[in-house]
Image (cartoon, helix red, strand yellow):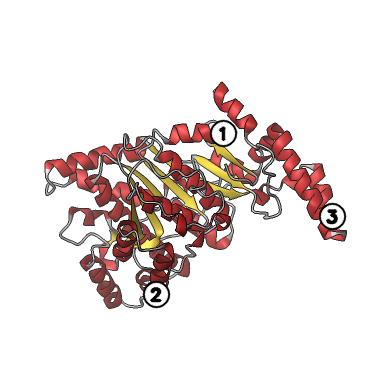
Amino acid sequence: MNRFVHRIVSARTRSAIPKEILYQEIARKKVVWFGEIHSEDRIVAFQNDLLKSMTADGCESGKLHVILEHFSMDMQCLLDTFQSNPKFSFEQLKQAYKDIGTEGHNLDPYRGLLMFCKQSKMPGFQFKEEIDFNSIPDSVFQDGKSANCEIHLYGGFMPRPLAGRLNKAESMEEKRALFEELYEKDFLPPRSSPAHNALFLDPDRFLLKGSQPHFRLIQSLMSGQDLYDPTDQEPELKDMADLSTPISRLYQAQVLKDHAMGYFLSKLMTKNHQDRFLVIAGMGHCKHFLGVPECLEGYLLQAQSSCDLDPVQKKAAILIQKETSARAAMIGCQMLYETYLEERYHPLQAAIETAENDEKKGGLEKQKAMNNLYLRQRQLFDTLILESEVIQGPLFNQSTGIGRFKKPSFDYCFVYDEDDDCVVSSNVCPESSDKEQAKAI
């Protein structure tokens, strides 16, 4: 896999695992959540490999539905055109996306991923003219293979300006008008739908349902508070229903987007309950299975208890709700520098000290030290990562910190080196020890 320093940490085994083991375990999952840092080349390269592994068995596990935060739901026609029209290029997709202008993500790093999904709908068609291999890290097309399973792309969020309107709304009339528009566009369940019961905590104030753990998580992203700091005291609970505070209003705008995606997923999954799903969104929308996963569960539970749905829909909702619990996996990411290896690995520390006087020499020493640690001292490298606070707290000790989270931040954490200068030489195989470990397992 990717020619840069990286590891995959499993929360269940509390160890670093080879990618082969990850892909074996993911192959048994119905729903895969990926909490990402947007438009990061290394993360998207990992997503490319993951997507490729999820389609390796052909359609034995059903079609694969890929839901992306990067596109709004009213961009679905654009995505459908991109996937169905061989002449509609990635550059045309990017320009149309820019012309709409509501979402603003950098799509360039996702070029390989999107083209892989496009090619899955047209297995006999080659898009070689679309791909600049030098511009896409670890491109999924480099081995000449295409997807063995049909992939469907979806925009997963409501347009950003709509969520922003809730944060800025000063009067009940403004909120009422906004929600009526959202009902009309089917971004949220209308009052006539049984799913509407999963929407509000206080319908009179248009106060959306959320959770205290998710509210604390979003608050910490704004404040920088360490929610995994061990404590015997119960955490201080700020009232997420107090809409007089800026953080509560911001949280309502955040959870509005989560509800929209959760509602969309509940409809998509019950309709296609025999298939598999990959959901890619920012970490704040799914970390610890909060946000969108919570909203999805609420809508699926409402569908089960409704007397208005036909038996087929209820049965599908029951099945999907069970499988999103029992056969779901959460994947996230973590930058390596936040593990502070240099404080515990002397050669790295020495390289950084050298760089203070000679930046070029220090940079070369750092690259050499990191590659040596990654390629020749893998057990030590893994130990240093696993003992770091950014892994211990979120993945292993999430229930004992201030946040009191029930589930780990992720089931699998992709730890990657963001330093462009630390690239593993193509003359070595950085995962040879991983392959031996995978065989042994």
Measured as percent of width and height from the top left, residue 60 is found at 31, 34
Query: Which label number is shown at residue 361?
Result: 3
> Observer-nearest residue: 93 or 200?
93
Looking at the rendered structure, the secondary structure element under dot 1 is: loop
Measured as percent of width and height from the top left, residue 385 is found at 66, 40
Q: Is residue 330 visible?
A: no
**Which comes before the other along the chain, label 2 or label 1?**
1
Amino acid beneath label 1: Pro
Residue beneath disc 1: 18
Q: Residue at x 69, y 38 (%)?
A: 428
Q: Residue at x 46, y 70 (%)?
A: 246
**Which comes before the other along the chain, label 2 or label 3?**
2
Circle 2 residues within 10 Å: few <14, some 14–19, many ≥20 = few
Looking at the rendered structure, the secondary structure element under dot 2 is: helix
Q: Residue at x 49, y 39 (%)?
A: 411
Amino acid beneath label 2: Asp
Residue beneath disc 2: 99
